[in-house]
C-alpha cells in the first residue's frame, strides 16, 4: 500500500515528464521514502527497496540486487523482464462507490440529527455537529469524535464506544487559504496535504514542510490531520513535532466552543486546561515572515530519522538579526526558542534564554550563558526516561543554531572524502565543523546501494539454483492464508488474556469495571476450568521443564496469564480484558527476585543438565601464569523482543468423540499436540494440530505459542464451541519473554604482543520464573565465544531464576551474546596495548589444530575451516586499509561527527537433528510433499521443492527441473506427519531436505524398473507417461523416510565490516556501509540464503543499537508497542549493503555440502556495535572524556543495546559546555556547525 500510494501520487503530477514504457514518474528517492515507516526487519529491507525502486523512471536496473527476473552479470537487465506496470491500469477506489457514499451523506442533510444505523454519524456542518452535541444520547464517555483516528495508534481505546462522530465531512474544517499574510489550514487537512501546501511557500514554510515530512510515516501522514495532532498535544502528554514547529512560527488557532469562536496563539491554546470533546479546533494560521534577517531552523532527535519514531527532543528556533554598523557584528533583535518532547506536557518557549539573548552580539561566552539558562528551563519531570540526555539534546540544538548566527566563519577547504558512500565533502582543516559540510549531504537522505556476490552450483541442479521463493506472489498480494485468515466456524467465540501486573502475589479475585466493554463478557476461563484428568500446563520441552497455563492462587511474575475473557468478537475480548480488575495480596510472600544480582544474592538458580553443560578448555591457572598482563571488566546485554509480524494466534475447534482440531501459528507442532493432550487429559490421537505457515517466529512461536493453543483448547472444550485468540501487540510483547538479559564479568590474561593466554567468564543469565529452553544457552554462548583461541578457557555460568516472564530462545540464542562478549574482550586488550583491534583479532584466530581442540568433532576437516581466509579477505584488503585511513582523516578533520570501522569474525556451531519426510506422486504426475518443518518465511518450502525435483530427477532427462512446477509442499499436520520435531536452530531446511531426498530415493528405486521397461519398448519417456504406467502397475507412489544424521554438528563461519558515523551532539548513528561474507557451504538456494543473511544481520543491528525491551520496577514490560519499541527500518539500514556468499569445500557429513544461513549472520551485526565504539573512542579523545570505571578516554564499555542516549553519554553529555569553555578562554569564537 505504501508504494502504491507513492506511485499514484507521482503519476498525478502533470509537470513531470512522461516516463519510459514500464516505469512510473516516481523517483528512486521517493520510492525509498515511501516505505520508510514500514516494519519488516526480517527481510533486511534491501529487497523491498529494490522492488520499489524498480518502478522509478530514474533507476539503473543494473543496480538492482539479486532477483528472479534475470541473472546479474549474465543476462541483460531490461524492464520487459519485470512484471508490467502502467499507471492507466492501476486500481483506484470505484467512482460509483464514491457517488453512493456522497449521496447517502447528502440525503442526511437537513435532518435535525443525522440518523445512523451503524453507530456512525457524519455531520456536514458545524450546526449539525452542535445538534449532535445537544442530543440526549451524547455522552463523552461513550461517543468518540474522530477525523482520522490515527491517534489510537498511540493512545489505545480503553473501552468500547457506542457511537462515533466523523467530522471530516464538515467543509469549514477542510479550508486551505493562502494570502500575503500567511497560510490557513483547516483542522482536518491531512498532514500530507499540509506538507504539499507549505512546500510551495517561502523558506520558513518549506522548512516546516520538511520537518513535517519526518513525522510519522507516509501512510499515516496521508490520513492523520494537522488539527488532530495539535489537539493531542493540548490534551495529552504527546511528543508532537508539529506543535513545536508551529509554535515557533507564530501560529494562531481558531477554536469553537459551545458558545463562541475564539482566536488564540498556539502558545495560549497549549497552556489552557485540556479542552473537552465539545471544543472544536477549526483551523490554524501560520503567518508569513519577511526573509530579511530571519533565520529559522527545526531539529529533532529520534531513534529513527524517518521511520515513524517520536522524538527524544524536538526544537524550532527562529531569530531576527541585524548588523551593527559600527562593529559589523550580528545583533540579536528578536528570537523565539521552542523545545518539546522532553517530558513536559507540551512544547514551551525558553523565555529566559530569549530575554537574555535579545540585543546581544553572539560570542562563545554569550552562547555558554544561554546554554546554562536553557538547562534551567528544559527540566524533564521525574519519571522521564533519559532526562540528562534530553537536556543535552536541547543544549546541542541551541548551540548548533546560535553557532550558525555567529560572524566568525572559518575558512574552509575542500577535502575529498572517498569513504563509504560519501564524496566531495567540505571539511574544516583546522578541526572545526563548517556549516556547509553537513548541509551539502544529509546522511539520512543518501540512497541505499547494494552488491551481492555468490556462486551458483550445477552439481545438484535444480538444488543450488536461486529460484523464486515458493508462495512469493501469494505473500506479496496478501492472499497467503495465515491462521487469522482462516474463515472461522459458525458460533466461534474469541478470547483475550487477563494477565498479572504484579510480580509475586496472591490473586484474591477478578472483577470488572462498569463499562460498555464489560457487558460483552460471556465468561472467564481460569485454572479451575481445566478438564478433570487434565493438567495446568501451558508449555513443556522434554527434559528441560514446563510452565503452567494459568496462575492458580499465586501469580509469580508480571505478565503471567490469570485467565481468558471470552466474548463474541476479538475486539470485544480485547476491550473486556482491559476492564478486569485483579485484587492482589502479598501477605506471607517473599519479595520478588527481579534481577540477576538479586538472584545471585539469594542463590536462586536453575540447574544446568549435565548433557547440556559446556566443557572448559585447558588449564586456566596455567594460562594466566603465562600472561604479561591481566585485566577484568563487566559487560551487560539486555533483552530483545521477537517482533514477528503475526502475533500469537490459535483457533481451536472441538470435534466429536472428545477430539479437537487446533490451527496454531507455532514452530513446535509436535510438542503443541503433546502439551494440549496433557492439558485436556485426552490421548494424543484426539488432538490434531495444523500449521500451514507462520508469520514470523525467530523462536517466539516455540514455547509461548503452545500457551495460546492450550488456552483456546481449554475454552473450546469447556464451552463446546470454537474459540480463537489473536493477541494484540501489547499483550504479545508483555507475555513473550524475549531474549535472555545477561551480565558477564570477564578476566583475561595476555602477552605484550597481544596473544591471549587465558580467559575466565562469570556469566549470569536472567532466565525468568521457569526453565523454558534456558538450559541450552550455556552451550551456545560458549560455542560462539570459542571463535578465538583463548589459550585456556574457564567459566562459571548461572541460570538465574527470577520473578519475570520466562525468557526463551530467540534467533541465535546465546550465540549472539557469546560472540559479542568475545569482541568486547579483544577490544579491551587492544585498547590497553594501544594497538589496532584487528591485529589482536588476527593473532588470536584459530589454526585448525586449536580449532579442533576447542570444538572437537564439530571442527570437521581442515579444508572446511574458512574463517581465517575470510577475515583476511576483508581486513587485509587494500579497500579496507584505505577506508580505515580515510576514517582517521575524517575524524581528525571533524569535531562534531566521528566515524568508526570494524571487522568482526564469527564462528557458529550448528546442530543437525532427525526429521521426517513424505513424498507422494499423484496419478497426474503432480507431487505432494509433507515434512515436519514449518514454513516461517525462511524459504523452507523452496529448498524442499528443489530437493524433491533433484531427488526424482534421476527419472527425468533434464535432471528434474521439469518437476519444479509439479511439486507442492502441504501444511504440517500432527496426525499425518508424526515425529515432526520442531522448527528452529537454522537446520530445519537441511533436515527436511535430506528426509525428502531419502523418500525420493525409495520412489526412484520403485520407478526405475518401470522406466527401463518403457524405454526397452521404445516408448516416449515423459514424466506423465511414467507415472501413469506405474499407477497401472500398482507401484506404491508414496514414500516416507525418517532421516537421522550420523554426524550431528558442524561449524559455520562469517566475517563482516561495518563503517558508521556518530553525531557527537545527538548520539545518532548512521551505518554508512556493511560488507558481509558468509560461508554457505554449497548453498541449496543462494537467493534464499542471501535473504536470510541480510534479514538476520538487520535483526542483529536492532539488538545491538536501538531495540530497548524495557520493564518497570515490577518486571512488567513497558516498551509494549511500536510507539516505544523501535526495530530497524529502511532509514536505519546500511547506506551501502554488500553481501558475498562463498561456497566452501564439500563435506559429505552435511546435506549436499550445504550450511545453515538463518541464524549465524545475525552475529555479524556486532561489527556495527564495534564500529560505534571506535567512533565514540575518537570523540572521547577529542573532548578528553574519561568517564567509566577505567577513567580512560580510550578504554570504556558500551553495553547492549547502544541506543542514542547511551552513545551520547559515552561521547560526553557536556561536550558543548566543554567546547564553549575552552574557546571562551581563548581569543576565538565558536565555529559554525551543522545539525
Image (spheres, rainbow, N blue to C red):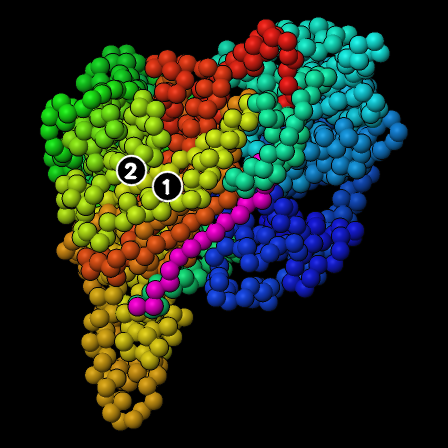
Residue drawn at x 52%, y 50% is 48
Q: Circle 1: is it few (<14), some (14-19), or many (20+) Cα within 10 Å?
A: many
Residue 655 position, x and y percent, is 31, 53
Q: Position of residue 165 (x, y in %)?
A: 68, 34
Question: CB atoms at circles 1 and 2 under 8 Å apart?
Answer: yes
The total of numbered circles placed on residues is 2
Tell whether position 450 is magenta: yes
**Quick check: 780 left or right of 1076?**
left
Comparing 1078 with 802, the one in front is 1078
Residue segment shown in magenta: 442-459
Residue 460: horizontal and vertical position, in percent? 30, 67
Q: Secondary structure at mark 1?
A: helix
Please check the rendered image and state whether residue 766 is part of the magenta-colored stretch, yes or no.
no
Q: Relative to 813, say whether 894 is above or below.
A: above
560 displayed left or right of 284: left
Return the residue at label 2. Answer: 842
In the image as oriented, which residue stretches furthest toward the bottom? 1017
Q: Position of residue 821 (x, y in %)?
A: 29, 30
Residue 1193 falls in which quadrant of the image?
A: top left
Q: Is residue 778 above or below residue 492?
A: above
Q: Relative to 918, is 401 on the left or the right? A: right
Evaluate whether residue 951 shows in this view. Answer: yes
Q: Residues within 10 Å of mark 2 (few under 14, many from 20)?
A: some
* Residue sitting at the far right: 180
| Residue drawn at x 30%, y 80% as measured from the top left | 1027
Question: Would residue 572 be visible to someone looking at this image?
Answer: no
Q: Which residue: 73% across, 17% down? A: 407
- Camera-side residue of 716 and 758: 758
Mark 1 and mark 2 lie on one chain; the one further toward the N terminus is: 2
What residue did someone put label 1 on? 875
Amino acid at each position: 500500500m505504501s508504494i502504491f500510494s507513492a506511485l499514484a501520487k507521482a503519476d498525478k503530477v502533470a509537470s513531470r515528464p512522461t516516463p519510459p514504457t514500464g516505469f512510473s514518474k516516481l523517483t528512486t528517492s521517493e520510492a525509498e521514502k515511501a516505505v520508510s515507516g514500514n516494519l519488516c526487519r526480517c527481510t533486511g529491507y534491501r529487497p523491498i527497496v529494490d522492488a520499489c525502486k524498480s518502478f522509478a523512471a530514474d533507476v539503473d536496473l543494473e543496480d538492482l540486487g539479486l532477483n528472479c527476473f534475470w541473472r546479474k552479470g549474465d543476462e541483460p537487465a531490461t524492464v520487459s523482464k519485470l512484471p508490467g506496470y502502467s499507471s492507466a491500469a492501476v486500481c483506484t477506489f470505484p467512482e460509483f462507490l464514491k457517488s453512493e457514499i456522497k449521496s447517502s451523506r447528502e440525503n442526511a442533510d437537513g435532518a435535525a440529527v443525522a440518523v445512523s444505523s451503524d453507530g456512525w454519524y457524519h455531520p456536514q456542518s458545524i450546526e449539525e455537529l452542535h445538534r449532535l452535541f445537544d442530543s440526549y444520547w451524547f455522552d463523552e464517555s461513550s461517543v468518540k469524535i474522530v477525523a482520522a483516528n490515527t491517534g489510537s495508534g498511540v493512545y489505545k481505546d480503553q473501552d468500547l464506544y457506542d457511537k462515533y462522530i466523523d467530522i471530516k465531512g464538515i467543509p469549514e474544517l477542510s479550508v486551505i487559504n493562502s494570502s500575503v499574510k500567511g497560510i490557513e489550514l483547516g483542522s482536518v487537512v491531512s498532514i500530507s496535504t499540509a506538507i504539499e501546501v507549505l512546500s510551495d511557500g517561502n523558506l520558513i514554510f518549506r522548512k516546516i514542510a520538511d520537518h513535517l515530512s519526518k513525522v510519522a510515516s507516509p501512510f499515516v501522514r496521508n490520513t492523520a490531520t494537522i488539527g488532530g495532532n495539535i489537539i493531542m498535544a493540548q490534551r495529552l502528554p504527546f511528543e508532537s513535532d508539529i506543535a513545536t514547529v508551529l509554535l515557533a512560527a507564530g501560529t494562531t488557532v481558531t477554536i469553537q466552543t459551545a458558545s463562541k469562536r475564539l482566536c488564540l496563539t498556539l502558545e495560549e491554546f497549549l497552556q489552557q486546561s485540556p479542552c473537552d470533546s465539545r471544543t472544536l479546533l477549526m483551523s490554524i494560521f501560520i503567518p508569513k515572515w519577511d526573509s530579511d534577517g530571519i533565520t529559522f531552523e527545526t531539529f529533532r532527535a529520534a531513534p529513527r530519522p524517518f521511520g515513524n519514531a517520536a522524538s527524544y527532543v524536538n526544537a524550532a528556533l527562529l531569530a531576527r538579526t541585524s548588523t551593527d554598523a559600527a562593529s559589523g557584528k550580528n545583533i540579536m533583535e528578536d528570537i523565539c526558542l521552542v523545545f518539546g518532547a522532553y517530558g513536559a506536557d507540551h512544547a514551551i518557549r525558553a523565555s529566559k534564554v530569549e530575554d537574555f539573548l535579545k540585543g546581544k552580539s553572539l560570542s562563545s561566552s554569550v552562547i555558554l550563558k544561554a546554554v546554562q539558562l536553557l538547562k534551567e528551563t528544559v527540566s524533564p519531570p521525574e519519571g522521564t526516561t533519559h532526562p540528562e540526555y534530553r537536556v543535552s539534546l536541547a543544549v546541542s540544538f541551541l548551540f548548533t543554531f546560535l553557532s550558525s548566527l555567529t560572524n566568525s566563519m572559518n575558512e574552509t577547504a575542500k577535502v575529498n572524502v572517498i569513504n563509504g558512500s560519501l564524496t566531495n565533502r567540505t571539511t574544516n582543516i583546522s578541526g572545526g565543523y563548517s556549516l556547509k559540510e553537513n548541509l551539502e549531504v544529509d546522511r539520512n537522505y543518501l540512497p541505499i546501494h547494494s552488491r551481492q556476490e555468490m556462486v551458483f552450483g550445477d552439481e545438484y541442479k535444480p538444488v543450488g539454483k536461486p529460484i523464486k521463493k515458493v508462495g512469493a506472489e501469494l505473500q506479496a498480494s496478501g492472499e497467503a492464508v495465515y491462521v487469522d485468515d482462516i474463515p472461522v466456524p459458525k458460533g466461534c467465540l474469541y478470547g483475550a488474556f487477563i494477565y498479572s501486573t504484579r510480580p509475586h502475589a496472591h490473586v484474591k479475585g477478578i472483577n470488572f469495571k462498569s463499562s460498555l466493554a464489560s457487558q460483552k463478557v460471556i465468561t472467564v476461563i481460569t485454572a479451575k476450568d481445566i478438564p478433570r484428568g487434565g493438567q495446568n500446563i501451558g508449555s513443556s520441552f522434554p527434559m528441560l521443564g514446563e510452565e503452567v497455563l494459568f496462575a492458580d492462587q499465586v501469580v509469580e511474575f508480571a505478565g503471567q496469564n490469570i485467565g481468558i475473557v471470552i466474548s463474541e468478537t476479538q475486539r470485544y475480548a480485547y476491550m473486556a480484558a482491559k476492564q478486569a480488575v485483579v485484587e492482589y495480596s502479598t501477605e506471607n510472600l517473599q519479595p520478588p527476585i527481579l534481577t540477576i544480582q538479586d538472584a545471585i544474592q539469594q542463590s536462586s538458580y536453575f540447574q544446568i543438565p549435565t548433557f547440556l553443560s559446556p566443557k572448559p578448555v585447558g588449564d586456566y591457572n596455567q594460562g594466566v601464569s603465562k600472561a604479561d598482563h591481566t585485566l577484568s571488566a563487566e559487560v551487560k546485554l539486555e533483552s530483545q523482543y521477537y517482533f514477528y509480524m503475526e502475533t500469537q494466534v490459535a483457533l481451536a475447534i472441538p470435534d466429536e468423540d472428545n477430539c479437537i482440531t487446533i490451527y496454531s501459528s507455532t514452530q513446535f507442532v509436535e510438542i503443541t499436540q503433546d502439551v494440549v493432550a496433557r492439558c485436556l487429559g485426552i490421548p494424543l490421537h484426539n488432538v490434531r494440530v495444523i500449521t500451514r505457515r507462520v508469520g514470523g517466529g525467530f523462536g517466539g512461536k516455540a514455547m509461548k505459542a503452545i500457551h495460546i493453543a492450550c488456552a483456546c483448547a481449554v475454552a473450546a472444550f469447556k464451552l463446546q464451541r470454537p474459540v480463537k485468540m489473536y493477541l494484540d501487540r501489547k499483550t504479545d510483547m508483555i507475555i513473550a519473554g524475549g531474549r535472555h538479559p545477561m551480565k558477564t564479568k570477564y578476566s583475561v590474561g595476555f602477552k605484550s604482543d597481544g596473544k591471549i593466554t587465558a580467559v575466565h567468564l562469570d556469566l549470569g543469565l536472567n532466565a525468568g520464573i521457569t526453565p523454558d529452553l534456558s538450559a541450552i544457552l550455556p552451550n551456545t554462548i560458549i560455542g560462539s565465544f570459542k571463535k578465538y583461541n583463548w589459550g585456556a578457557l574457564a567459566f562459571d555460568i548461572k541460570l538465574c531464576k527470577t520473578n519475570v516472564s520466562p525468557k526463551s530462545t530467540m534467533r541465535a540464542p546465546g550465540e549472539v551474546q557469546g560472540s559479542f562478549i568475545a569482541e568486547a574482550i579483544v577490544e579491551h586488550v587492544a585498547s590497553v596495548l594501544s594497538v589496532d583491534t584487528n591485529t589482536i583479532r588476527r593473532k588470536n584466530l584459530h589454526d585448525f589444530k586449536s580449532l579442533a581442540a576447542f570444538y572437537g568433532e564439530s571442527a570437521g576437516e581442515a579444508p572446511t575451516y574458512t574463517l581465517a581466509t575470510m577475515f583476511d579477505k576483508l581486513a587485509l584488503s587494500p579497500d579496507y586499509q584505505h577506508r580505515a585511513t580515510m576514517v582517521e582523516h575524517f575524524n581528525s578533520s571533524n569535531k562534531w561527527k566521528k566515524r568508526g570501522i570494524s571487522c568482526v569474525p564469527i564462528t557458529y556451531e550448528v546442530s543437525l537433528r532427525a526429521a521426517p519426510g513424505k513424498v507422494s506422486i499423484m496419478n497426474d504426475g503432480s507431487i505432494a510433499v509433507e515434512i515436519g518443518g514449518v514454513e516461517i518465511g525462511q524459504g523452507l518450502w523452496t529448498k524442499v521443492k528443489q530437493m524433491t525435483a533433484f531427488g526424482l530427477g534421476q527419472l527425468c532427462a533434464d535432471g528434474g527441473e521439469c518437476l519444479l512446477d509439479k511439486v507442492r509442499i502441504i501444511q504440517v499436520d500432527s496426525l499425518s506427519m508424526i515425529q515432526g520435531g520442531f522448527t528452529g536452530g537454522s537446520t530445519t531446511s537441511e533436515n527436511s531436505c535430506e528426509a525428502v531426498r531419502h523418500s525420493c530415493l525409495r520412489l526412484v528405486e520403485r520407478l526405475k524398473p518401470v522406466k527401463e521397461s518403457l524405454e526397452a519398448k521404445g516408448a516416449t519417456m515423459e514424466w506423465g507417461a511414467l507415472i501413469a504406467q506405474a499407477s497401472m502397475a500398482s507401484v506404491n507412489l508414496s514414500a516416507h523416510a525418517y532421516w537421522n544424521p550420523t554426524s550431528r554438528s558442524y561449524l559455520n563461519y562469517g566475517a563482516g565490516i561495518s563503517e558508521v558515523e556518530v553525531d557527537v551532539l545527538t548520539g545518532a548513528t548512521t551505518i554508512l556501509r556493511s560488507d558481509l561474507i558468509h560461508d554457505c557451504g554449497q548453498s541449496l538456494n543462494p537467493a534464499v540464503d542471501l535473504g536470510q543473511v541480510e534479514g538476520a544481520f538487520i535483526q542483529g543491528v536492532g539488538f545491538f543499537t536501538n531495540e530497548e525491551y524495557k520493564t518497570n520496577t515490577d518486571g512488567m514490560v513497558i516498551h509494549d508497542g511500536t510507539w516505544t519499541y523501535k526495530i530497524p527500518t529502511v532509514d536505519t539500514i546500511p547506506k551501502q549493503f554488500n553481501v558475498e556468499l562463498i561456497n566452501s569445500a564439500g563435506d559429505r557429513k552435511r546435506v549436499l555440502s550445504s550450511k545453515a544461513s538463518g541464524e549465524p549472520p545475525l552475529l555479524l551485526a556486532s561489527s556495527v556495535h564495534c564500529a560505534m565504539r571506535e567512533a565514540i573512542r575518537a570523540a572521547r579523545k577529542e573532548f578528553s572524556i574519561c568517564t567509566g570505571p577505567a577513567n580512560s578516554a580510550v578504554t570504556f564499555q558500551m553495553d547492549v543495546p547502544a541506543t542514542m542516549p547511551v552513545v551520547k553519554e559515552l561521547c560526553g553529555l557536556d561536550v558543548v559546555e566543554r567546547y564553549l569553555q575552552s574557546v571562551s578562554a581563548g581569543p576565538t569564537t565558536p565555529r559554525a556547525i551543522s545539525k
